[in-house]
Structures are given as C-alpha cells and as structure tokens.
Image: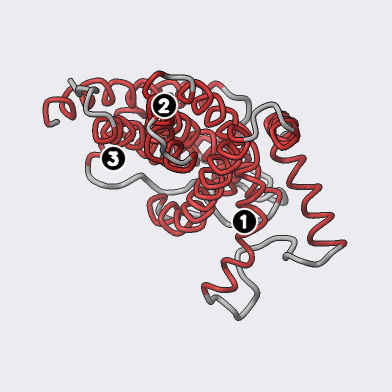
Amino acid sequence: MWTYLLNRLAVNIPTLFAILVVVFVLMNMAPGDPVDAFVPPTAVLTDQQKEVLRHEMGLDQPLPLRFVSWLQQVAHGELGLRYKDGSPVLQEIARRAVPTGLLTIAGLGMGALLGVLTGLISARAYRRWPDHVLSVLAYISISSPAFLVGIIAMYVFALQLGWFPSGGYTDPGDESWRNILYHLAMPAMVLSLQFIGILMRYTRAGLLETMSQDYVRTARAKGLSPQQVLFRHAFPNTLIPIITVIGANFSALIGGAVFIETVFSWPGMGMLFLDGIESRDYPLIMGITLVMAVVILIINMLTDLIYSRIDPRITLR
C-alpha cells in the first residue's frame, strides 16, 4: 500500500502543480484590473496612484515571479492576504469550509443512499412499472440543471408551501444544529438530485448484469431466498462501479455547490469563490483552487484504497 501511495503522490503532485499554473495564467489573462475592484467606486485615482497600489499588491511583477512568490507563501503555511479587505485567505477559507463541507457531505450521503436504493428497486422490478417510472425520473434528474431545480424548489417548497427556509445558514440568534440541518435539507437535496439519477442508473445496470451470472443462478438453485441472493451474492459484486461513480462525482458535487450556495445564499466556499472572481481577488482564487484540488486528489486516492478492500483481486501498485 505504501508503494501505491508513493506512486500516486508522484503523479498527484505534478497534477496539482499543473492545475495551479493553468488557473494562475487564466486568472491573469482575464479582463479587468484588481486595483479597480479594490478601490471604492466613489474614489477617483490618478494613474500614478494606481501604479503605487499595483506595486503594493505585487501586481507590477512578472507572472513567473508572482507565482513563485505565492508558492513560497504556501510552503510556509500561508495563502496570502485578500486584495479586497486585507484579511488572511487561509482564515477566510477555514471559516467557509464548514458550511461547504456540510452541504457536500449531505448531498453525497443523500445521493448515495437514494441512488443505490432506487437502483435496487428498479433492478428488482426489471421491465415492470416501477422500473419504468424510476428510469424516467432518473433521466429527468440527470438532465435538470442544478441552479434551475434550486430556483423551482425554493419557489415551491419555501415560498408557496413554507416547508423549508428560502436560504441562509441559520436563523438569526439560533445557531443550533437542528436549525442548521433545517436550512441544509433543501440545498442538499437539490445538490444530490443529478447524483441520485446517475447512481441509480449505474446500480441498476450493475445489478442486472450481476444477476445474470452463473454463480447467482447457482445460488438460486441452492434454494436461497431472493433477498439472500441479492444482498449476499449480487449486490457486493456491484459495489466497485458504485464506488467508482461516488468517487468520480464528488468533484462534480463540489462544483455544483458553487451554484447551489449562490441560489440558497449558503455561506460556503462557493459564494466566497464567486466573490473572489467578481473582485478579481487573485490570492483568494488561488487559495480556494489549491484547497479544492487537494481535497479531490485525496478523495480519488481513498477511492482506490476502498477498491482494494472490497475486491481482493485488485492489487494496488
């Protein structure tokens, strides 16, 4: 296992470096001047004053030198200061990481539970009406944009029915976990909707393929009940593609969280990232990119480790 981890690190470190280089270059190629976003709209600065601000912010240095300077800060455990207000980037990310983590984990948990459950039901009812209904619903969920579903859900369940709050992290003055989970329910469900459809289709397809194998027919011939055949023989051998889909869609859930946080005013890293883009806050954008890339690469490594635990035939090299 240690050899595998070292090999993956040898691949992931250059991958992470390439991601940071691409984002840094594209970010600096984008139109707009961070100085204009930094200065209040009512302030009128001369070109000389703007040049002084660029010098103080380090924007007058060549791109390679600025990138190396930022990497040095990262090596010392810092991510720099925001252009917008001078606050430490690491502190801002740490403050927003908990809401984003809650939203992503809740969406992943709901998606995995409901996706596998509906996939099991659909496979058991193959070519009957529950299978047809769930397949149609899965296609609809996969085809529906998250931001559009979020707006519709807010209108129906928050504004019309009043079942859930329309947005926010908590009610003012009430920061209990119960209140947080109440606000979390609808954004997490909207975030997981596409994931549910994708996982349902993979679970259904995997089970149908497994149920046609010889060892499953042998288990039936031995007189095992349908539940024993399904959960002791068929379902365990379907876990590999299921785990693959869960690991692969984790990064998609993080990306989808950006839109969901905006729709539901959820104070996470997605809203912080959009704020950094609007204000051209380069240190903030790079800091969030670094954290997100590291998390996704770690999740991919953990997915491979889980493979080897579930299926001993898989050897990590």
Using the image as rendered, state which of residue 123 and residue 314 is in the foreground: 123
User: Image check: 27 left or right of 182?
Assistant: left
Residue on which disc 3 sits: 74
**Secondary structure under badge 1?**
loop
* Figure quadrant of residue 20: top left
Q: Which residue is drawn at the image coordinates 67% and 56% (left, top)?
A: 186
Q: Is residue 109 shown above or below 221?
A: below
Using the image as rendered, state which of residue 135 and residue 44 is in the foreground: 135
* Nearer-N-terminus badge (3/1): 3
Q: Residue 208: give x, y in percent of width and height.
A: 53, 24
CA–CA distance between discs 3 and 1?
28 Å
Q: Residue 117: give x, y in percent of width and height.
A: 56, 44
User: Image check: 1 left or right of 241?
Assistant: left
Residue on which disc 1 sits: 266
Name the image quarter holding the N terminus. top left
Visible residue check, residue 168: yes
**Disc 1 residue crowd, few under 14, some 14–19, many 20+, Cα 10 Å:** many
Q: Residue 185: give x, y in percent of width and height.
A: 63, 59
Residue on which disc 2 sits: 216
Q: Which residue is drawn at the image coordinates 47% and 30% (left, top)?
A: 245
**Disc 2 residue crowd, few under 14, some 14–19, many 20+, Cα 10 Å:** some
Residue 187, numbered circle: none
Q: Which residue is drawn at the image coordinates 48% and 50% (left, top)?
A: 105
Q: Residue furthest right?
A: 160
Q: Looking at the picture, which amino acid does disc 1 mark?
A: Trp
